[in-house]
Image (cartoon, rainbow, N blue to C red):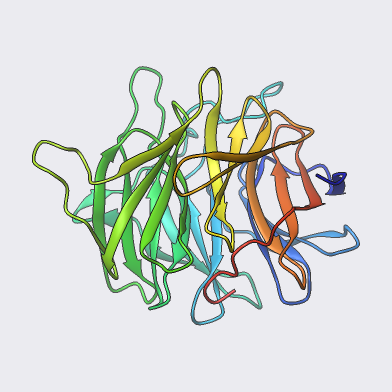
């Protein structure tokens, strides 16, 4: 693994990086309620004053960006992570961000009459719809259930496809689009769901909460955050507390572990001509890092 270069610092719990055609990276700042652009030379500028708690970000079929927003969390001095819902929190939601102006438009705030809790990450399929996870807000004495949903980019339809789960975070599709991966934060578990069509996962068995197959997990204090799928089909999962990017094969084998200079590496994405340039959000320190990964990441639909 090559050395890590810090591209930007002073970010407010960065997440959701995406690489743009010009080589810049747009990411979310959950703590600061905004989306930020970082140019290849490290210049930082405001992209979208979207509000709430912006988290996962992805380009859609119309060229605009789509954002999972957890609705806002409470941050206090001395703690890098949010400590429960923000005092003004009402619900989580999904937004569309204009690619030129950054203007945010609300797409979804509920599914079948149930309010979204804390939408976290999303991935588009080749048909132009997207799967997204809901992490579920942690309250002082209880937490909301997590789940996985499927939605259309025009705001016309959203459905529940896996519910309940404990704490679904990052998500991604296999290169052939037939498997949906979702990272479960608490307990560091990686789930795989069989995709049978756009927004259609393999039905769950009787008495099962969902149809996911647990393919990997880590012991000890490790917790999983967001993920990126590789061109090979392996899955790179940002691993909290231990501070690694953990690359896992579809069979569940640990392929490699890349140590990051932070205890909260929260997300990873890929870019560059050979798709081997990895961008990692280091959220405890509030930084965006860049390094060369041994193999290329998967080029995402519409990115």
Q: Which residue does the image show at 75% across and 39% down from the upper left?
A: 286
**Image coords of residue 221 (percent x, y):** 55, 19
Which quarter of the figure has residue 228? bottom right
Residue at left offset 43%, top offset 69%: 176
Q: Quadrant of residue 50?
A: bottom right
Pick the front one: 231 or 165: 231
Coordinates of residue 73 in the picture (x, y in percent): 52, 36
Location of the C terminus (image quadrant) = bottom right
Image check: 94 left or right of 17?
A: left
Q: Position of residue 75 (x, y in %)?
A: 61, 30
Q: Quadrant of the N terminus?
A: top right
**Left or right of 43 in this view: 30:** left
Q: Which residue occupies 79% across, 47% down?
A: 289
Name above or below for residue 15 compared with residue 233: above
Residue at 58% across, 70% down:
103
Residue 28 in view (yes/no): no
71 or 227, which is in the foreground? Answer: 227
Tell which of 165 and 140 is nearer to you.
165
Return the residue found at the far bottom. 62
Q: In the rendered picture of this protein, how many numbered marks are placed on residues?
A: 0
Q: Residue 280's spot in the image, x, y percent? A: 71, 48
For the question of whether residue 274 can be seen, the reply is yes
Q: Is residue 80 above or below residue 39?
A: above
Q: Is residue 39 above or below residue 171?
A: below
């Amino acid at each position: 693994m090559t050395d890590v270069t810090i591209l930007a610092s002073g970010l407010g719990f960065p997440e959701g990086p995406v690489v743009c055609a010009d080589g810049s990276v747009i990411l979310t700042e959950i703590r600061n309620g905004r989306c930020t652009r970082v140019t290849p030379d490290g210049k930082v500028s405001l992209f979208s004053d979207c509000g709430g708690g912006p988290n996962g970000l992805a380009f859609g079929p119309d060229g605009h960006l789509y954002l999972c927003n957890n609705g806002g969390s409470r941050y206090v001095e001395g703690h890098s992570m949010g400590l429960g819902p923000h005092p003004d929190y009402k619900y989580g939601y999904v937004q569309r961000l204009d690619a030129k102006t950054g203007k945010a438009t609300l797409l979804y705030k509920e599914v079948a009459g149930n309010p979204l809790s804390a939408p976290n990450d999303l991935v588009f399929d080749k048909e132009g719809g997207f799967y997204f996870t809901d992490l579920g807000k942690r309250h002082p004495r209880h937490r909301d259930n997590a789940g996985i949903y499927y939605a259309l980019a025009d705001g016309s339809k959203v459905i529940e496809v896996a519910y309940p789960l404990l704490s679904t975070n990052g998500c991604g599709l296999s290169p052939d689009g037939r498997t949906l991966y979702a990272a479960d934060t608490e307990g560091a578990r990686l789930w795989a769901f069989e995709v049978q069509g756009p927004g259609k996962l393999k039905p769950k068995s009787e008495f099962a909460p969902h149809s996911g197959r647990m393919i990997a997990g880590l012991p000890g204090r490790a917790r999983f955050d967001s993920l990126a799928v590789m061109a090979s089909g392996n899955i790179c999962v940002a691993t909290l507390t231990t501070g690694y990017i953990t690359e896992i094969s579809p069979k569940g084998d640990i392929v490699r572990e890349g140590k990051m200079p932070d205890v909260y590496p929260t997300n990873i994405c890929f870019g560059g001509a050979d798709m081997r340039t990895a961008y990692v959000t280091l959220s405890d320190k509030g930084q965006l890092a860049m390094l060369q990964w041994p193999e290329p990441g998967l080029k995402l639909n519409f990115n």
